[in-house]
Amino acid sequence: MTTSFKEYTVADYFKDRLEEIGVDHMFGVAGNYTAGLLDTILADSQSPITIKGNANEICAGFAADAYARLKGPSALYVTYSVGAFSLLNTIAGSYVEQVPVILINGAPTNKEDQVSKCAGLLYSHTTGYEFVDIHMFRPITVAAERVTNALQAPFQIDSALTALLSEQRPIYFEVTEDIWRSPCQRPQGRIRERQNDTLTVSCAKEAAHATLELMLSKPKSIFWAGIELQRLGLQDEFLNLLEIINREHSMPDGHIHFVTSALSKSVIAETHPWFEGCVTMSPSEVEQLVGEDGVLVGVGAWTTGKDTGNQDIRSSNTILAAHQGVYVGASFYPSVMLKDYLLCLTEAFIELAKQNSANLSGIRKAQQPTNLQTADGYLGYDSFFAAMSSWLTEDDVLIVDAGFPLIGAQSVKVPARNGFVAQAAWLSIGYSVPAGTGVKCAFPDKRSIVVVGDGAFHETCQAVADQHAYGQNTVVFVLANGIYGIEQYLVNPNPFRKPPVDYQDKLLNNVYSYNNLPNWQIAKLPDAFGGKGIKVSTVEELLGVMEEIRTHDDTNYVVEVCIPKEDTPLSISKEADSAVGEDEISNPDWPPAGKF
């Protein structure tokens, strides 16, 4: 009698380590080079890992990103070069926005590499240069490993996963097909993030003390709740700090409140009584918030172009704690973990309360954009987002795409913590639709509500098919104005002015032809992809569809929302009259008489 014994392999090692760090979803497109790993996962009926197939690699990449920013590490599986090259955009976005995605790229066998070198045979999916894939991903990951030897595989896997947990950014594995089933040692110990506490506690105390001094010297302060609060799971610590400050130090004329920005929208539920709005932190906005006698305290906030209006806002009145460092005015405190800083700052305010010497006197109110409801049923960006603001619930997650949708959505009050997702730093159009897939996988009890422009929808509309195949109830609102609106605005905002400048060069009076989009029948796409498609062109029709959606919790929808070509969100409309397009400056008629 013989007893069957399954040899422990590299694929087993990889699977066990993924499970250990909490990976339970893999997104991707099937290929024979990764079959060894996928088959190993499928063979284990007890494995918590669910393998999800996607319409294409870009949809997989954006879905994995959205999942990981809300739930923790996720994984992608693709095929060498032809699959991996499509993910350069998505992984770069995950790197910039600090999202822990694991890219697993199945590669040709060692034998095939040798034959290619010695005999000059060019295999499918290869360029002839064996390091081309890993060289492309090294700059946009915190660790990149090419696994070609089963003896070294455990060390390479552990090292990269440690970097993932420590940096909360993407990592890359390139594994040759023949290595998956090669014998391998079992894991030794557990994967843990690197600890960097040599200097951080003392520096954190110094940074907290400097913060307290500056806030006391300029008492009109406001906090900027940043994206790292969500990425590092520090929302409760931040709210505890505000509770301590406002309980012990509030004065009759107000409390110390907080705002967010596009990238950090909903890191704290926007129904919180101390929330004062989602704003762009331009120097003028900072001046409006705190003036010369106040301090802007950015906690985990990044100074990205979208969040600061592409301007440097650092000054003697700003405190910025992020990226493991703290700026207090011109002073910099390196190697400070955000959690340590929050705890030290909280302790500093508790100690101050014991001394009973508080001198914090509240804030200036952030100006909330006005939501426009029109009596004539006119459906534009502002009336759409006004309806969205009233319709959204705590059981929804709002996912919006770059461009006018992201700008318009800043006025929507999001009632749930982590109830808003947008790629607000990298700003790749097309992110939102497949991100809706990932959000629903991360939060099965929530409903993904996607708002996307028609140009971005053209990029990744196939994700609707994924949502239907997964049995999701995701809703995709496509704001269809027939143009790349944000691109037109940046180059020449004249068509959006009310009224436009009448240039002699008539080209400047109209939307450029290259910004026009193909005329899709968007509401009919679910006939092929799955789900239900509806087209609306008035506010009344929109509200009717929203009511219908609430009564059908098991259906995925695509709603084509017809927006006039020249319509823009309110903030864009206000800026258009004074904004100067790149093409206008170079025009001989610039500046037009009496306009600027």
Image: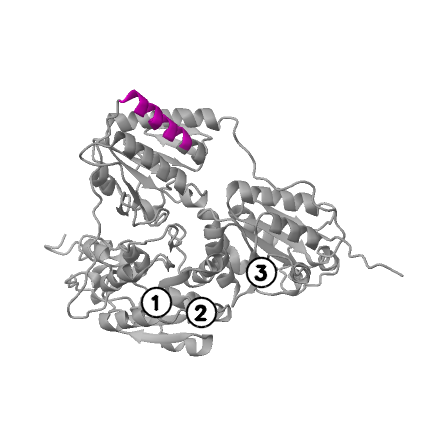
What secondary structure prevails in the magenta region?
helix
Q: Nearer the viewer, residue 345 or 452?
A: 345
The answer to whether 422 is drawn above or below residue 249 in the figure is below
Q: Are the residues flagged by discs 3 and 2 in contact, CB closer than 8 Å? A: no
Which numbered circle lies on residue 469? none
Name which residue lies at 45% across and 24% down: 202
Element marked by disc 1: strand
Q: Are the residues flagged by discs 1 and 2 in contact, CB closer than 8 Å? A: no
Q: Is residue 346 magenta?
A: yes
Per the rendered image, the range of residues in magenta is 343-356
Q: Position of residue 449 (x, y in %)?
A: 37, 62
Q: Quadrant of the N terminus?
A: bottom right
Element marked by disc 2: helix
Q: Amino acid at mark 1?
A: Phe
**Circle 1 residue:** 477
Could you tell me how far apart the alpha carbons at marks 1 and 2 are, in whole angstroms? 11 Å
Q: Residue furthest right?
A: 1
Q: Position of residue 525 (x, y in %)?
A: 41, 76
Q: Nearer the viewer, residue 140 or 539?
A: 539
**Circle 3 residue:** 50
Which numbered circle lies on residue 464? 2
Name which residue lies at 38% across and 67% down: 475
